[in-house]
Amino acid sequence: MIKKIKQALTMLNKNQDDGTIKEAPVSSMANKNEENREKAGWVSPAYYHSRAVHLDPGFLARNRCLAYLDNVPEAEAYRVLRTQIIQRTNGARSRTIMVTSALPGEGKTLAAINLAFTFAREFKNTVLLVDGDLRKQSIHKYLGYDSGKGVIDFLSEGAPVSELVTWPGIEKMTVISGGRPCQESAEMLGSPRMKELVSEMKERYPDRYIIFDVPPILTGADVLTFAPLVDQVIVVVQAGKTSMEDVGKALHFLPKEKILGFVMNRCQAA
């Protein structure tokens, strides 16, 4: 698998020099592929009002954000997960998804990031990834850029949503960071302003999935206060680490009707 990752990184790094993206020559094959995607229904909005950042493929691979690449087994696993989510939410407005875990260190943030990368490749939908772990924001760290303004700036200072959105150079994907750390995270996540923000995110683009990375369930009240604002919940469990007892405790704090399913992380292939 390491060889495949290196090959993919070689292709992705061909047009990079000292962190600056250069335009590659447009070939007839590239034009044909673009034409085929458009005929098949590919729609990609232009993010003119978002802060643009550059993602380093090598940095992403080292942080196991592997769904950014095409030809690794992890990417295919997330395609399966994406398909299951779409099938269960198709035709409904159940597109706000909270990704959490029972305890810290079980891979929920990486699962949220990789799932967002995978949704960005889907033809019919766009995706917004939101860092809702206000005490310990980490999405921007995994992706390799400065956080800038985030959720807390909207909640506490009234910053407009347009100032929160970051475009990581990936078609059909945007990111909102958490902003500066906030110790009163449970109160902020359950506030009327947070409800207003989720509603605005959801109603602005009806074809957009919104993925929230939130704190672990058993570490505080954040998930309890935020769960009523989302449509679906995904719980990440780590193979060989998360106990059934902890999973059972975590489930007691979640609305049963909103649990979309579980993601088994670090599971060895048979």
Image (cartoon, grey):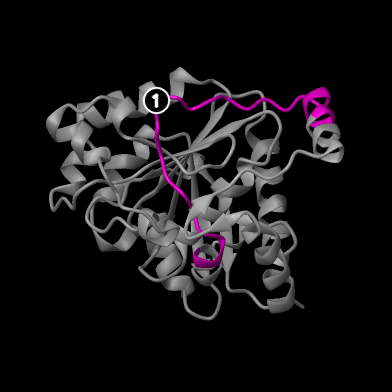
Q: Is residue 243 above or below residue 152?
A: below
Whole-percent x, y for residue 238 in the image = 51, 72
Quarter that holds the C terminus: bottom right
Is 144 or 74 nearer to us in this picture?
144
Which residue occupies 62% across, 57% down? 67
Residue extending farthest bottom: 240
Residue type marked 1: His
| Drawn side of residue 131 relative to residue 96, left or right | left
Q: Is residue 186 above or below residue 13?
A: above
| Drawn side of residue 246 relative to residue 34, left or right | left
Is 12 or 47 nearer to us in this picture?
12
Which residue occupies 52% across, 72% down? 62
Whole-percent x, y for residue 263 in the image = 57, 60
Whole-percent x, y for residue 60 in the image = 52, 63
Whole-percent x, y for residue 209 in the image = 54, 34
Question: For the image shown, how many numbered marks are present on the structure?
Answer: 1
**Residue 106 lies in the magenta-colored region:** no
Is 149 or 184 nearer to us in this picture?
149
Badge 1: residue crowd in 10 Å (few <14, some 14–19, many ≥20): few
Which residue occupies 78% across, 25% down? 38
Part of the protein shown in magenta: 35-59
Quarter that holds the N terminus: bottom right
| Drawn side of residue 270 relative to residue 204, left or right | right
Residue under pointer 1: 49
| Residue 16 falls in image quadrant | bottom right
Q: Report helix, strand or loop for mark 1.
A: loop
The dominant secondary structure in magenta is: loop
Q: Is residue 61 above or below residue 56?
A: below
